[in-house]
Image (cartoon, rainbow, N blue to C red):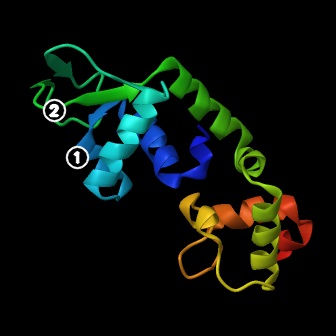
């Protein structure tokens, strides 16, 4: 499973890195995505071993940094990053845009460079889903960084 292919997966992992422990509805609010999409993504990430359910009956704010009260009884299913998830987030932060470059096919790299140079109208759905382009066909700031790695001429735009 290549998590860089879906922006939502990356957003969830980064949210859990900031929050420590959190539940589905709060994650959906934090990443600005529909609850159903977030819950499906949480299941996928859990199956991939990148997140795990947090055990126990009481949750302390020292573990769940986004909680307002010092201690909360659990009424939701809480998730946290697993060791593999922590490693993925560290790698992503260390490699930045270069990590996305490895996840793209040759055709997607070509499409990204063409979008950057203005030779193409409309972005492929895979680039939109990865968060490199928006639905209108324009590159996102992350898309511009990755495109500059594909075609250095894009860096000047």
- Badge 1 crowding class, 10 Å Cα cut-off, few under 14, some 14 to 19, many 20 or more, is some
First in sequence: mark 2 or mark 1? 1
Q: Residue 36 in the image: x percent, y percent? A: 27, 52
In the displayed structure, would residue 13 be above or below residue 57?
A: below
Q: Are marks 2 and 1 in contact (CB under 8 Å)?
A: yes
Q: Secondary structure at mark 1?
A: helix
Residue drawn at (70%, 46%) of the image: 96
User: Where does label 2 land, which residue?
Assistant: 76
Q: Secondary structure at mark 2?
A: loop
- Name the disc covering residue 15, or none: none
Quarter in which the C terminus is drawn: bottom right
Residue drawn at (57%, 61%) of the image: 131
- Name the disc covering residue 25, or none: 1
Q: Is residue 44 visible?
A: yes
Residue drawn at (64%, 39%) of the image: 93
Q: Residue 106 in the image: x percent, y percent? A: 83, 58
């Amino acid at each position: 499973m290549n998590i860089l292919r879906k922006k939502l997966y990356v957003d969830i992992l980064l949210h859990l890195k900031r929050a420590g422990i959190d539940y589905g509805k709060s994650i959906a609010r934090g990443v600005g995505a529909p609850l159903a999409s977030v819950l499906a993504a949480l299941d996928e990430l859990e199956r991939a071993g990148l997140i795990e359910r947090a055990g126990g009956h009481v949750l302390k704010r020292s573990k769940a940094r986004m909680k307002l009260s010092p201690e909360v009884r659990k009424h939701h299913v809480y998730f946290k990053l697993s060791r593999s998830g922590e490693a993925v987030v560290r790698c992503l932060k260390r490699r930045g845009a270069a990590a996305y470059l490895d996840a793209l096919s040759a055709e997607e790299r070509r499409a990204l460079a063409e979008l950057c140079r203005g030779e193409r109208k409309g972005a492929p759905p895979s680039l939109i889903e990865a968060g490199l382009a928006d639905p209108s066909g324009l590159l996102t700031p992350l898309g511009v960084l990755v495109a500059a790695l594909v075609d250095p001429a894009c860096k000047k735009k």
